[in-house]
Amino acid sequence: MRIVDLVPEYETAWLHSLEPYSEELRDGVERKRAWYHTMRERGLIVKLAVADDGAIAGMVQSLPIEQTWVGGEGLHLILCIWVYGHKAGIGDRRGAGLSRALLLAIETEIRLAGGLGVAAWGMALPFWMRAGWFKKQGYVPVDRVGIATLLWKPFCKAAQPPHCPSAKPVSPPLEPEKVTVTCLDSGGRTPQNANCERARRAAQAAGEAAAFRRVDTIAPEAAEPWTQSYASGSMIGC
């Protein structure tokens, strides 16, 4: 197993969330590509786990915390860390230590680049991005919104803990006498992009009975009022 940077030969797998065979995800790829080209200029770090058989089996990505909806200074925020866990495609690759290797690799790069520490968000429930897993890796909880926990690992005494926005979440405006669909989407998560595109098409097919609104949350100031949309495009987060 090798941990590598994102290079052109691996972009297709990464843009498809490691599922290049998936028809369902294709609608979200181009928006993810646009997000990538914007965010790599803002300090995005992507690491991939390449298995011994050459399969891209895991990924992790982070941004300077100033480029996210989370409050903090001098830190990086882990947006996503995931190891392939489906029977289809390349098969379940969990249980081989890939997550720890990915996290160590990105922590090392952040530290060498002068970062003061790493923040991460995790779910209180036992599924994807579990807060409990980050605790086992030395991360300490510092804030929480609903079932989402914000954790961090400082590298030095000068580091200050991150925090979730304190503003009350805004409610999306509704169109009178219409089904109103509001999609929070920065472009950073291919599945979320695809979901938003399908929602747009469904609203369009409904004609005057529905209204669709896409809120671009790629900018921190756009994401913060919603206290969610964790800069990689999810509708779950702090």
Image (cartoon, rainbow, N blue to C red):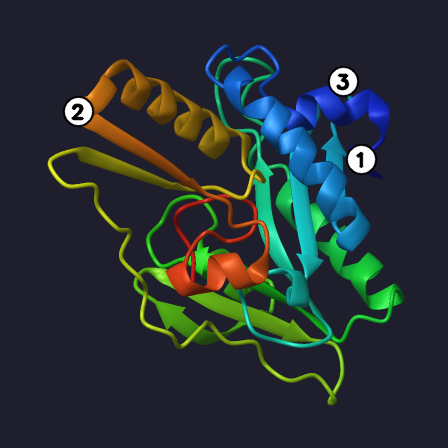
For residue 174, above or below residue 210 = below
Please state which of the two labelled residues, at mark 3 or mark 1, is closer to the viewer: 1
Q: Nearer the viewer, residue 179 or 168?
A: 179
The kind of residue tagged 3 is: Asp
Residue ranking furthest to the left: 177
Residue 127 or residue 29, whichever sits in front: 29
Who's the residue at 55% across and 16% down the image?
A: 26
Q: Amino acid at mark 1?
A: Leu
Residue 18 seen by the camera: no
- Which of the two marks, 1 or 2, is nearer to us in this view? 2
| Circle 3 residues within 10 Å: few <14, some 14–19, many ≥20 | few
Q: Secondary structure at mark 2?
A: helix
Mark sitting on residue 215: none
Residue 189 in sight: yes
Q: Is residue 100 above or below residue 1?
A: below
Location of mark 2 (residue): 209
Tell me which corner region of the image, top left, top right, bottom left or bottom right, holds residue 112. bottom right
Q: Amino acid at mark 2?
A: Ala
- In this view, 98 is above or below 160: above
Give the mark toward the camera: 2 or 3: 2
**Residue at x 35%, y 59% (from the top left corner):** 124
